[in-house]
Image (tube, rainbow, N blue to C red):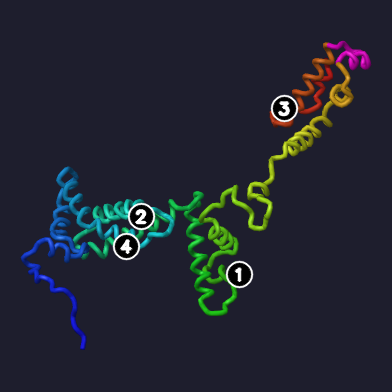
Amino acid sequence: MLTDMTPNRPQVDSTSTPALSAARRTHDEPPRSAALFERLVELEQGPERDAVRDELVKAWLPMAHRIAGRFRDRGEALEDLHQVAALGLVKAIDRFDPARGAFESYAVPTITGEVKRHFRDRTWALRVPRRVQELRNRVRLARRDLTQRPGSPEPTPADIAAHTGLTEEEVVTGLEALESYSTLSLDAALATADDGYSLADTLGITESSYDVVVDREAARKALRRLPERERTILYLRFFEDMTQSRIADQLGFSQMHISRLIARSCAHVRSEVLGECECPTGSGRASAA
């Protein structure tokens, strides 16, 4: 025979104990809520309306915190989620029309949507355009739908595109976004490396010689369009490393004239490479001196 060993508890009349009555009342049905909403709609902007709204926020805040609690353990501090949910609650109170029904049926999706938007817009390690985030969600749901049956193969981008109506390029973008929610530190050790190599060790560096190659190729065409005498002078000066005096003696000019021709030819080539020269190349202006 079972015996009730529970200690005797005093019988308390809930109707005579306001504290107990308030504890049993759910947060979803705050006292005077309907009357406060009716009053809020009638009031104009000002201190009185702000006071009524603050009272409603305090009354419904526990519900907002409960909604935020559903998203705990997803990488965001619970205090931050409480703040986001409170913001959603304020928006719901400001937009609610008492004539349309119960406040809870309107506030719950509003607050939930605010918290979800927070995760969508604020918790990515890198700023991702909203369009890419939406592609990511559509691709994620399509993959889940296509792999629900046991033994289903991993869907290809073409399968997902046919299922969602997206292009294969958009599906590839969404698949890449699936792996881009968080970033990996450059100091992270490589899983296949036993000697302490990090991800940063696999990255290349900027090669300055590439710029030299580009500059040479850009200048080559402009040099070919110079008059032959100017090309000869530049070749002797910069490739044979001859002094201006030696060049002047070899070509029968003064050293000052060779200096002016070198400066003028270099400026002409530079202007043409940079797209700043409006005169026709090899017009004879440099060789006329």
In the rendered structure, which disc, 3 or 4, sits on the residue that comes first in sequence? 4
Q: Is residue 244 left or right of residue 16?
A: right
Residue name at image x 36 percent, y 55 percent: 78
Could you tell me which residue is drawn at 52 percent across and 54 percent down?
182
Mark 1: few/some/many CA within 10 Å (<14, 14-19, 20+)? few
Hey, what amino acid is under mark 2? Answer: Leu
Q: Do the residues labelled 1 and 4 touch (CB within 8 Å)?
A: no
Between disc 3 and disc 4, the foreground one is: 4
Depth-wise, is mark 2 or mark 3 nearer the camera? 2
Work out whether residue 146 or residue 73 is closer to the camera in this orientation and state it: 73
Q: Find numbered disc 1 in the image and state the secondary structure of the residue it sits on.
A: loop
| Three-letter code for the amino acid on which mark 4 is drawn | Pro
The answer to which of 234 and 279 lies nearer the viewer is 234
Provide residue 163's location: percent of width, then percent of height. 53, 71
Q: Which of marks 1 and 2 is in front?
A: 2
Q: Which of pointers 2 and 3 lies earlier in the amino acid sequence?
A: 2
Q: Can residue 228 be seen in this view?
A: no
Residue 156's disc is 1
Instruction: Estimate the spatial distance between the alpha carbons at disc 1 and disc 4, rounded to whole Å.
Output: 34 Å
Q: Is mark 2 on a helix, strand or loop?
A: helix
Q: For mark 2, what is the residue?
A: 78
